[in-house]
Image: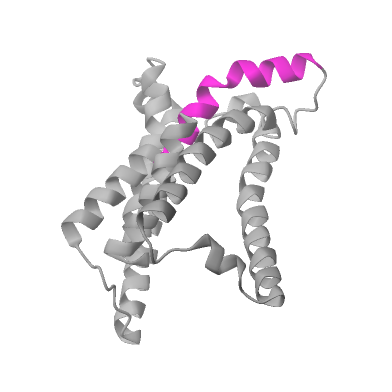
Amino acid sequence: FGAMWGVGNVSYGLTMRHLGMSLGIGVAIGVTLVVGTLVPPIMHGQTAMLFSTRSGLLTMAGIAVALVGVAIVSYAGHQKEVQLGAEVKEFNVMLGLALAVMCGIFSSGFSFGLDVATPIRTAALAAGVSPLYARLPSYVLIMGGGAIVNLTYCFVRLAALKRLSLRADLSQPGPVILKNAVLAACGGIMWYLQFFFYAWGEANIPVRLSYV
């Protein structure tokens, strides 16, 4: 599932190339939201609970509200791009939509990974790990799978496209390399913190509200 999530990451970037930021993010996030939320309970044979219990109905309502929000933000972003005259050089609706849907489905692999990694969390709790951090060991496997896919894609691109040169990048002046390294590190840390604080939030949700 980590590798599946990694494919979703790669296709996310390609979606931006062919569909633009606003439309690409809207479609990709929308599909991820629906697939990542609904598939785990369906796989556990709990489909009926989504429509027959209070928690299930609240979950479905939450998905609907979130999708409306994504649609509004995507539309607003598209309008802004039009007003600013932003242009997607490699714009391709059919390819972009296909990649966005693919991104949404494969990015849900992280949710699937968390679901099947429940025994790891249980083992961590049994070993005395704080509930705030019990989810983190499973991240190593899930993100490790994603990292392998992303690194493979990057190195294949470096090898295939002569206009891309790691040596040329590293030959830049020291201050430029340092600045880029710091910015990249900050971006990576901030990106990871979403998962870190997700684990904290999950640990503080009562069992009766686990559907949240």
Q: Nearer the viewer, residue 160 or 101?
A: 160
The magenta region covers: 107-127
Locate residue 190, reporting x and y percent.
65, 56
Locate residue 145, reporting x and y percent.
52, 33
When asked about the image quadrant of residue 91, the answer is: bottom left
Locate residue 71, reporting x and y percent.
33, 59
The answer to whether 114 is drawn above or below residue 191 in the figure is above
When asked about the image quadrant of residue 19, the answer is: bottom left
Q: Nearer the viewer, residue 183 or 155?
A: 155
Q: Which residue is pictured at 52% across the width and 20% down the height?
A: 116
Specify the color scheme: one colour
The answer to whether 50 is drawn above or below residue 175 in the figure is above
Q: Which residue is pictured at 61% across the width and 66% down the height?
A: 170
Q: Nearer the viewer, residue 42 or 11?
A: 11
Q: Nearer the viewer, residue 2 or 166?
A: 166
* Horizontal relation, residue 163 to residue 182: left or right: left
**Residue 95 visible (yes or no):** yes
* Horizontal relation, residue 94 to residue 201: left or right: left
**Residue 61 visible (yes or no):** no
Magenta-colored stretch includes residue 42: no
Q: Main secondary structure of the magenta part?
A: helix
